[in-house]
Amino acid sequence: MKTKVAVVGSGNIGTDLMMKIIRTSDVLEIAALVGIEPSSDGLARARRLGVAAIDSGVDGLLAHPDFGQIQVVFDATSAAAHIANAERLSGTQVRLVDLTPAAIGPYVVPTVNLDSLLDAPNVNMVTCGGQATIPIVAAVSAVAPVRYAEIVASISSRSAGPGTRANIDEFTETTARAIEVVGGAERGKAIIILNPADPPLIMRDTVLCLINACDTDAVAASVHGMVARVQRYVPGYRLKHEVQFRRVGVDSFENDVLPSGARAERLMVSVFLEVEGAGHYLPPYAGNLDIMTSAALRVGERLATAVLA
């Protein structure tokens, strides 16, 4: 028996997540898509697919006759909207999976820390850049302490909707913090680039990790193993090049970048990634949205399995 879920947010991310649940999940059943714009393409698509389309927001979801059967609610709105939605849903039976940068609940990255958060009432999916890069930081951190990690996420401007554009500051702050909290880096920094190229380019991510000298073969093996684990739920996630290592001196960095400690020669680990979307609702170049919805689906399925257990 499948677990009933609802998706709040009828934009690109919410609609893509609805399509993934319908097409690929053996665990979840979409009970409702919730929005505030009656004429949105997402709600129109839900109606055509026989999914309850609620255009009055979370209040409409709470009044829906099947709400009592819904176990998991995915919020694909905005950081500000999620704060209000979480308050409205507090005290109900639902578990919240937050796809916004609001970060009310703990950060979750499926391949890194999902199993430790199965009892959390509200988990945060960090950002698309975080879902793509934090597994790599964690993989490096598993072999050698990461003194500093910097990620650059380059996405097509066509795949950056109003919610993404409204949350650029939250993106950088949330991702940088999650690089430290989940990825294990002492210091973290995040940069996002909206690429206006036409035809659109798919998502590209660069991960730079500053570590002490160590077994580079072990670091590369850890990164390859992590990429394989992410590919289980994001098939279009892949390395563009082999993991690269470069010896750097402390003079290569500003004093406010390097953490305190012994100022010895270090290794810079460079990992270059590409994320191609599955094309369930959005074009394949929108890998930034695909990795977010794919990771959220993996979290929702794991939470549902834990609830049923």
Image (cartoon, rainbow, N blue to C red):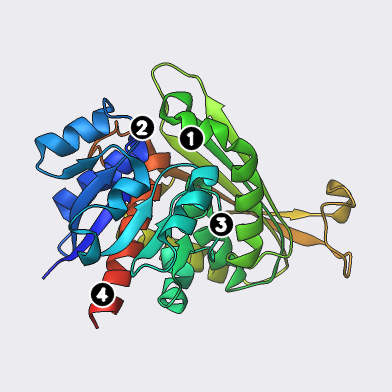
Between tags 1 and 2, which lies in front? 1
Q: Residue at x 42, y 78 (%)?
A: 119
Query: How much space separates mark 1 and mark 4, taking CA atoms?
Result: 30 Å
State the mark number for residue 40. none
Residue extending farthest front: 63
Q: Residue at x 49, y 44 (%)?
A: 81
Query: How much space separates mark 1 and mark 2, taking CA atoms?
Result: 18 Å
Residue that badge 4 annotates: 305
Mark 4 nearby-residue class (10 Å; few <14, some 14–19, many ≥20): some
Mark 1 nearby-residue class (10 Å; few <14, some 14–19, many ≥20): some
Residue 218 seen in this snapshot: yes
Residue that badge 3 annotates: 103
In the depicted view, which residue is nearer to us: 94 or 163?
Answer: 94
| Residue 152 quadrant | top right
Q: Amino acid at mark 4?
A: Thr
- Which numbered disc, 1 or 3, marks the residue that appears first in the sequence? 3
Residue 276 seen in this snapshot: no
Residue that badge 2 annotates: 285
Relative image position of residue 136 (x, y in whole percent): 53, 59
- Which numbered disc, 1 or 2, marks the residue that appears first in the sequence? 1
